[in-house]
Amino acid sequence: MPGSERLLRLPRGRFLHLGDRPLVMGIVNVTPDSFFEGSRRFDPDLAVETALEMVRNGADIIDFGAESTRPGSSEVAPSEEISRLLPVIRAFRANSAAVVSVDTRHAETARAVLEEGADIINDIQALADRNMPEIAAHHGAAVVLMHMQGTPATMQLAPKYADCVTEVADFLRHAVARARAAGIPDDAIILDPGIGFGKLLEHNMDLLSSIGVFRLMGYPVLIGLSRKRMIGELTGREIQDRMAGSIGGALAAAILGADILRVHDVPETVDALKVCTAILSHASRKEQT
């Protein structure tokens, strides 16, 4: 489990506490075509109510996305992303002060949602859009820098690495350098090794086993494996039946040091983390006596 408390810097003088257990980031897909049908909330009112319910059930962050980045998906224009996102973020902000993340790789979208009160830009392309670093820095946003080999349309065609962990870590170091050069402070940076984004099962397993390597880079680590293909490969179950496997993966990631878990199933993950944290804390206290 994560160790001593740290603070993640957010816009408008806010901070998010990272402590003894991973934070839970609830996924709200404002899309008609996300890979898990149960997560689709294309109707704005339904998206807002889903997000509010996640907060009531213990989510620390709500991650809104308006572009499906499942394997084989096509890019959504920023104008379409914005039209999907803004009504949802405005309505959510009118009802909640919870931390808002937006899953986008487009600087134009990032500017629009940050002006409406978003706190974090969750970027699957790690600031590849040349305007993204400056926009995030100007608005004081935290950023998630994720590794992906290829694009969503091509990433799972033939993933190949000589040393997956080393290559992903090197990529993330370069992404951090871009963020810092633009003025994004160290305490506003989160790393994501990109489980399932241009990786085979063996690559995903290597990355998860090496969460400690990424934490040694000095930044919080986000892990998103909820209902992904690797869960199906390990359990033999279809997407709609992968909740138990996803929670098992989330707990393993938590024990290995993940700071933030991006999940579809918020109340179940929150409860599992509470029990896991309580047992591990009790065991640790007994060892010290």
Image (cartoon, rainbow, N blue to C red):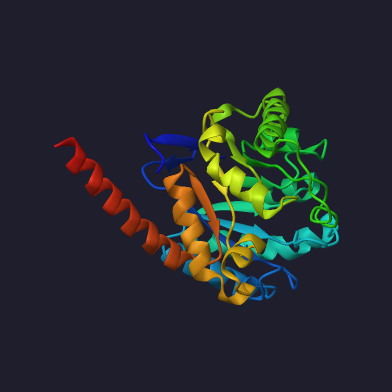
- Identify the residue at horizontal 72%, vertical 47% (top origin): 124
Q: In front here: 64 or 190?
A: 190
Q: Position of residue 30 (x, y in %)?
A: 69, 67
Q: Is residue 161 visible?
A: yes
Picture quarter containing residue 3?
A: top left
At x 54% / y 72%, what residue is drawn? 49
Q: Is residue 97 visible?
A: no
Instruction: Where is residue 11? Give x, y as percent.
Output: 57, 40
Outermost residue toward the left? 289
User: Considering depth in this image, is 120 or 275 the residue closer to the camera?
Assistant: 275
The image quarter in which residue 64 lies: bottom right
179 or 52: nearer the viewer: 179
User: Residue at 58% of width from left, 69% of height from top?
Assistant: 48
In the rendered view, does 218 fall on the left or right side of 228?
left
Q: Nearer the viewer, residue 195 or 92?
A: 195
Which residue of the protein is positioned furthest toward the top in this rendering? 181
Drawn side of residue 54 relative to residue 63, left or right: left
Q: Is residue 222 above or below residue 234?
A: above
Q: Which quarter of the rendered picture does the N terminus lie within?
A: top left
**Quarter in which the C terminus is drawn:** top left
Please report the residue visible at 60 percent of the width from the left and 71 percent of the height from the top: 236
Residue 115 x, y percent position in the rendering:
68, 48
Is 268 located above or below residue 175 in the figure? below
In the displayed structure image, the side of residue 44 where residue 80 appears, left or right: right
* Numbered circles on residues, count: 0
